[in-house]
Image: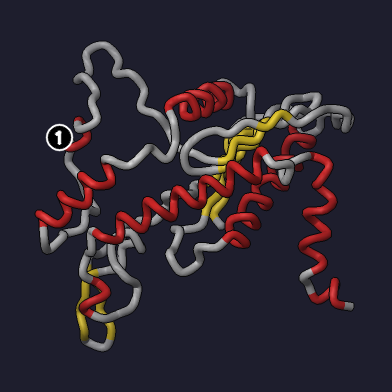
Amino acid sequence: MAVALAGSANLTAPKPSLGGTFTILPLSPQMPTLHVTRKPNPTIIASVSASSSSPSTGQAQWSLDSWKSKRAHQLPEYPDADELESVLRTIGSFPPIVFAGEARKLKDKLANAAVGKAFLLQGSDCAESFKEFNGTNIRDTFRVLLQMGIVLTFGAQIPVIAVRRMAGQFAKPRSDPYETKDGVKLPSYRGDDINGDAFDEKSRVPDPQRLNRAYLQSVGTLNLLRAFATGGYAAMQRVSQWNLDFVRHSEQGDR
């Protein structure tokens, strides 16, 4: 799991007491967000995504399709443009995975980090996969970010925003559009929402139907994250239990 840390904090400051309560809220697109006040009073947000900010004066008016006017790299070449358009229309008719209010809450918290009033902790795998989609993996990933956020909160004495790129992080940018093995040249694997990782011609052809599965997996992942965040699993009182769960299934726990 890749982890990025951002923000400023006084790590030598005296530690806060354990007196405090958890306030748990569902939040934004694509990653769990852990927010803890100095009391501490963590706010868990089980998802992630960013909303587009309003354009400043002099910039072109933003719209849902304005990104299409920009030069794009790393786009797959689908063999059937009509099938791609059909899939995109279908997904476009589905309910949103996250909501504007969730994105705005995350945006407000990130603004605090930008001015040094909070600490941003960001972590993720390289990309999500269809093969590893299960509740245990989602729970364990969520728990790691919670644990790291709590440690940083008591060390830094400022709120921590823990962000996980999840529930939609499938695509993989490539340095070369092609991959060669034993003299065989095939399109590079670009992520499960585009093509397959098996090194054969059929698997490497971009398939727009994979976008449907990516949407459904993202919905399932985010629903489970929201349940963990609001159902008591993320409560401060469970910190010790998280560690016990890890030890119970280790070699040390078997002794």
Q: Quadrant of the N terminus?
A: bottom right
Q: Is residue 46 above or below residue 158?
A: below
Using the rendered image of the protein, determine whether residue 10 is visible from the camera's viewpoint.
no
Which residue appears at 45% of the width and 48% of the height? 219
Tell me the crowding category of disc 1: few under 14, some 14 to 19, or many 20 or more residues within 10 angstroms, Cα based: few
In this image, 21 relative to 174: left or right? right
Q: Residue at x 17, y 37 (%)?
A: 68
Quadrant assignment, res 229: top right
Residue 160 occupies quadrant: top right
Q: Toward the viewer: 162 or 185?
A: 162
> Residue 233: horizontal and vertical position, in percent?
72, 46
Q: Is residue 6 left or right of residue 74?
A: right
**Position of the C terminus by quadrant:** bottom right
Q: How many marks?
A: 1
Colouring method of the image: secondary structure
230 over 40 or under it: above or below: below
Q: Is residue 82 visible?
A: yes
State whether residue 225 is above or below residue 157.
Answer: below
- Asked if residue 235 lies left or right of residue 76, the reply is right
Please give the name of the residue rendered at 33% of the width and 18% of the height, measured from the top-left corner. 54
Which residue is most to the bottom? 182
The one of 61 and 193 positioned closer to us in this rendering: 193
Examine the image and state in which quarter residue 154 appears. Answer: top right
- Residue 201, placed above or below residue 174: below
Percent across and percent down for residue 240 are 84, 51
Residue type indicated by callout 1: Ser
Please report the residue visible at 49 percent of the width from the left and 49 percent of the height from the top: 166
What x and y, as percent, mark residue 50?
Answer: 43, 33
Which residue position holds label 1?
Answer: 69
At mark 1, the secondary structure is helix
x, y percentage for residue 231?
Answer: 69, 41
